[in-house]
Amino acid sequence: MFLSAVWALILTAPIHCRASMAELLVITAATEVNDGYLRFMRTIRQFNYTVQVLGLGEEWKGGDVARTVGGGQKVRWLKKELEKHKDKQNMVIMFVDSYDVILASGPEELLKKFSRFSHRVVFSAEGFCWPDQRLASKYPVVHHGKRYLNSGGVRVCGRDMLFEFLHKYCVTLNDNVTLFRSSVFKKWSKRKEKLQLNYLGNYVPSAWTYEHGCGICDDDLLDLNGDEEMPLVHVAVFIEQPTPFLEEFLERLATLIYPHTRLRLFIHNNVVYHEQHVEQFWTRHRSLFPGARIIGPEENLRQDQARTMAVEACKKDVSCDYFFSIDSDVALTNPDVLRILIEENKAVIAPMLSRHGKLWSNFWGALSPEGFYSRSEDYIDIVQSKRVGLWNVPYITQVYLIRGETLRSRLAPVSLYQQEGMDPDMIFCKSVREQGVFMFVSNRDEFGRLISSTNYNISRLHPDMWQIFDNPVDWREKYIHEDYSKIFEDDENFVEQPCPDVYWFPAFSERMCDELVETMEDFGGWSGGKNKDERLSGGYENVPTVDIHMNQIQYEKEWLKFLKDYIVPVTEKLYPGYYPKVYIFIFL
Ligand SMILES: *[C@@H]1O[C@H](CO)[C@@H](O)[C@H](O)[C@H]1NC(C)=O
Ligand SMILES: *[C@@H]1O[C@H](CO)[C@@H](O)[C@H](O)[C@H]1NC(C)=O
Ligand SMILES: *[C@@H]1O[C@H](CO)[C@@H](O)[C@H](O)[C@H]1NC(C)=O
């Protein structure tokens, strides 16, 4: 987990050093200016902290730089820096990391909290034992707050203490963080100094943090008005499993509001069943997408290879301003999505999407210590748009926009999708995180939803018809008549009544009528005969009913759902106060 690397190691001189008189200096270590560093420095400026940055421009030799500038090198820099302050009696020094730290309150509050400890050295604590879980049992049990030492900051008040401390506990250290932490811990506890394992209130945030919508504040302001100047976007589409409503998905590519001359389309279709849909799409819209590249299932390209191929194409093309990756189970119903995301001006950004009415989304709010899903405290509020903004998150998937320049620089050294034993989405996010590039998800606009493809049965003739449960919104858009909702408007004459108690109103779309008829015919004909001939020669029944036909085509559950959701409300409108049972004959 990201914040595990924060240290707050605080040293204080005895009694005479009162926080109110103290001067506070923040010391941090960073070897490169990355997103995390810039965020840290914004909070430093926000609260007017005095800061000293160690290590910028120096080569890092301390090990796992992705997690933190950690280990012995950091401590050596710190020692050297502290020489300069050794005569300042009233100085309190706080040593913190920068990439994964933000300061959430000002110096005054920090000093107040610090003085309450009445200890010379205070470490911050954390909820799990990193980097070596095996040391966990060696820590004392705490009854409140967090149990494990966190490795990240020193506050010094007065000179001697710090030198004593660093001298005794740090001189023998190499660049091994584990060793450092365990040795500090052991020696310190041997001296029977009571170790403060208190969590310092809001000094370190416990979750991934909100970024103010600082969208277009500094660098390249984009002029999105002149067509010629629109950034060139490589759009990469991945159809990796049978996906409901794929025709609609493809159709949306053609209706994106963006000059198509500035798009380069790449499609990887790994599903034989969908070849027909890609072909139809291509026949209709090929003129919109010059220079497109379509790779079908016959090429036997694995998902990770296809993703790598697409991203490499943008990397190699210096005119590629953005790489937009989109999976087939994403329904981007906002045609302005590209312009909106580009205007947010981030290196990596995803539009926030979730499954209709569900908490299942395309981002994670936090990571578990093992690097898997963990729910952040604000996750639900973000998914439900009760909190709206641009969110810095550790994991995004299915659809995102990456700046081409970032691919060619910060992300250039890493393989974004290929690594033994890991799924491409996990590799992608891990690599981006490790390069110190922030990923954002935006819920400032409505972008669409995710499609569920878990119960998609392509042995059916028209499998989308069965999706009324899993993908109700898409089902409605495809199969319910566009005028259906007018039934509930004020126009009394909209529902016709050709004879008493018989009503005419639009319910199904043309598409539904066609597919239902085709499905019945494919099964062997309407009630009254197994096939057309039998039927014409006079069969047993001439209405399709729930109990016979719908269950013959295994559509009973879906049909009842349709009746409940779409027909019952109509009868309630026509017969106010009468609550019908769902038991209806439909004449087609
Ligand atoms: C920070 O310092 C500036 C200039 O001295 C001052 O105007 C501002 O109010 C200070 N901000 C805070 C949060 O103390
Ligand atoms: C770091 O120190 C720990 C604890 O002594 C040891 O188990 C581990 O092997 C060391 N790691 C390296 C890379 O030296
Ligand atoms: C998938 O559809 C086929 C053909 O309609 C049907 O026989 C089969 O039972 C279905 N499978 C599932 C899991 O519903």
Image (cartoon, rainbow, N blue to C red):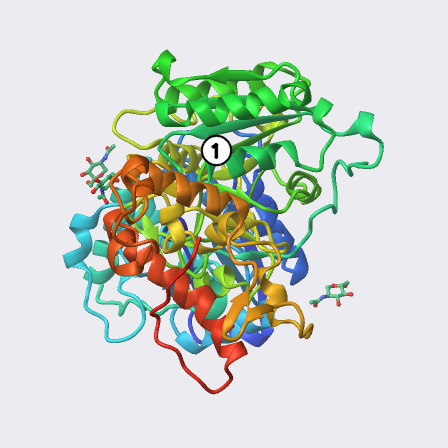
Residue placed farthest to the right in the image? 226
- Disc 1 under 8 Å from ligand 2? The reply is no
Give residue 408's position: percent from left, percent from top.
Answer: 58, 22
Question: Horizontally, is 51 left or right of 371 in the view?
Answer: right
Q: Quadrant of residue 343?
A: top right
Question: Horizontally, is 354 left or right of 232 in the view?
Answer: left
Give residue 532's position: percent from left, percent from top.
Answer: 32, 37
Question: Horizontally, is 46 left or right of 148 in the view?
Answer: right
Q: Quadrant of residue 460?
A: top left
* 474 and 558: which is toward the camera: 558
Amino acid type for the residue under numbered disc 1: Gln
**In what element is the residue under mark 1?**
loop
- Mark count: 1
In the picture of the structure, the residue carrying the numbered disc 1 is 435
- The residue located at (38%, 64%) in the rendering is 122
Give residue 350's position: percent from left, percent from top.
Answer: 54, 43
The answer, for residue 327, to whether it is visible in the render is yes
Residue placed farthest to the bottom in the image? 577
The answer, for residue 307, to whether it is visible in the render is no
Q: Quadrant of residue 520?
A: top left
- The residue located at (36%, 34%) in the rendering is 242
Look at the picture and state if 153 lies above or below 460: below
Callout 1: 10 Å neighbours few (<14), some, many (20+)? some
Which image quarter has ligand 3?
top left
Residue placed farthest to the front in the image? 537
* 180 and 79: which is toward the camera: 180
* 503 and 467: which is toward the camera: 503
Give residue 83's position: percent from left, percent from top.
Answer: 51, 47
Look at the picture and state if 66 lies above or below 568: above
Question: Horizontally, is 54 left or right of 185 in the view?
Answer: right
* 518 and 213: which is toward the camera: 518
